[in-house]
Image: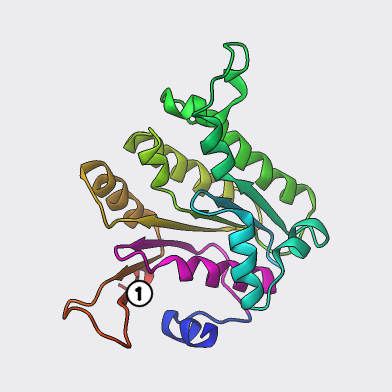
Amino acid sequence: MLAQISQFLAVDPSNFPKNEHIIVGDRSQEGGFLIHYFLNLCLKQKRPVVFVGLSQSFSHYNTVAQKLGTNLLLARDENKNLIFIEGLNLLSDCVRLYPSDSTESNSFFSLLKGDITFFLEEIGKSISNFTKLESPNAPVVIVDDLFILLRAGATTRDIIYLVDTLYDLLTSGPNKGSLILLSHLENSDDETDEAWAYMRQMCSIKIEVSDLKSGYCKDVHGQVCTVNHFDQ
């Protein structure tokens, strides 16, 4: 399956390009497989990866990765080329009661107040850690699912600021990194559409996963449309 995906996306599975910025829009709840594909591909190429898991737990991603031949525990704890940010834990923290003197250090509590600074700082520190390692391989930041932040209280402006900041962090160093963002679009609204439109302008590859226009099919669950903006 991985070879088929690489062929469809015109991606060399042995040499994932640097400075590639990919957005995945999921309109069918079936697009998550692409995140697992990119994570597996980058780790097998020994690319340093910062993975922000807002949709599932680390154990879920690791279970899927093992089926694809990659051990995330090994990558995180021994090889040190994976930093996993437990977005679900941070999201659960924001609904707990915190004394007033502890809220300043909680990124998602700040997010709910319209401040995305701490969340950005956490990702920025992770990228900086890879920079200090002086790895010859360009870093990759993967976020699954970016628009969960919208549902958690962030604004479109926050999302655009987050995307811009990640883009700048990855492209400012000598080793041009890559950004891969998954966003669920099946329940889109004005804020979702505005953020997605902005992301389309900055990406090099846009991928959309949707249901079949012809309706349900037993053997085919959906369709994938990809646009390489550099080829247009």
How packed mark 1 is, by other alpha carbons closer than 10 Å (few <14, some 14-19, many 20 or more), is few
- Locate residue 21 relative to residue 131 in the image: left or right: left
Report which residue position mark 1 lands on: 231
> In terms of depth relative to the viewer, which is nearer, 136 or 191?
191
In the rendered image, residue 7, in percent from the top left (x then y), is placed at: 47, 86
Q: Is residue 218 left or right of residue 30?
A: left
Above or below residue 138? Residue 159 is above
Color encoding of the figure: rainbow
Secondary structure of the residue carrying numbered label 1: helix
Q: What x and y, as percent, mark residue 3?
A: 53, 87
162 vs 176, nearest the viewer: 162
* Residue 197 forms part of the magenta stretch: no
Looking at the picture, tell me which residue is in the foreground, 97 or 38. 97
Range drawn in magenta: 15-44
At x 43%, y 27%, the residue is: 112
Q: Position of residue 105 (x, y in %)?
A: 62, 23
Q: Give the quadrant of residue 186.
A: bottom left
Q: Amino acid at mark 1?
A: Asp
At horizontal 40% and vertical 67% (from top left) the residue drawn is 31
Residue at the right extreme, as displayed: 78
Q: Nearer the viewer, residue 41 or 172?
A: 41
